[in-house]
Structure formats: C-alpha cells, structure tokens
Image (cartoon, grey):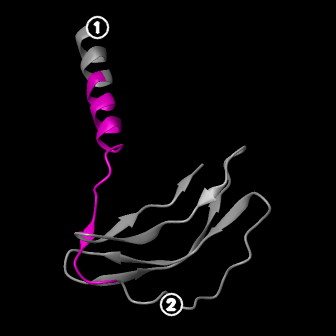
Amino acid sequence: MKTTSFLSALLLSLFLLGGCATKTVVVKTAPPPPKKEHRAKCGPRYVWVAGHWSWNGHRYVWVAGHCKRKKRGHHWVPGHWKKTPGGWKWVPGHWS
C-alpha cells in the first residue's frame, strides 16, 4: 500500500511539474495587427484578457479575448509579441 501511495504521489508530482514548463515561441514573420473585438463585461471579480495572435507552427491564429478570475493582490500583465534579433518572440500574459 505504501508503495502504491508513493508511486501515485510521484506520478502526480511529475505531471504537475511537467505543466510548469513554458515553450518559447520565436517566429520569423511579424504577427498581424490585433483584431478589433467586442470586449465582454467582466464581473467585479474578473479582469479582461485581450485576444492575441498565436503561432500554431504554420501560421498565426487568433485567440479570442476572455474574462479571467482576478488573483487577490495581483494585476494582469498582458501577453505580447516582442521583436528580437532571431524573430518575433511570444511573451505570455501573467499575474504580477
């Protein structure tokens, strides 16, 4: 029983840690201009996260904006594409 519990805990830890890794995306071509989108009314416990272009490995695809639950004591820093010497790098949005 102890072995089963240990293995279960180990597998769960590896699964959770695997989700922490972020993949750096660098694209040679600049993203299109942002789309104009209808900004939804978020409730008082939510913040609006604007839509953005995402690279799917072949082309840019639009990811629609959405309301995201606020984190107490934090503010949302929007994601953005940053021009680098190697191309355009996606900097994900995050709580700060």
Q: Residue at x 57, y 91 (%)?
A: 36
Residue 35, which numbered label?
2
Residue 81 horizontal/vertical position (percent): 41, 72
Q: Which residue is mark 1?
A: 2
Residue 63 horizontal/vertical position (percent): 44, 77
**Type of amino acid under label 2:** Lys
Highlighted range, magenta: 10-30
1 in relation to 11, above or below: above
- Give the left or right position of residue 78, taking residue 23 as reference: right
Residue 1 position by quadrant = top left
**Type of amino acid under label 1:** Lys
Residue 79 horizontal/vertical position (percent): 49, 66
Residue 90 position by quadrant = bottom left
Q: Alpha-carbon neighbours of circle 2 within 10 Å: few (<14), some, or many (≥20)?
A: few
Q: Residue at x 20, y 74 (%)?
A: 57
Residue 10 or residue 50, whichever sits in front: 50
90 in relation to 52, above or below: above
Helix, strand, or loop for circle 1?
helix
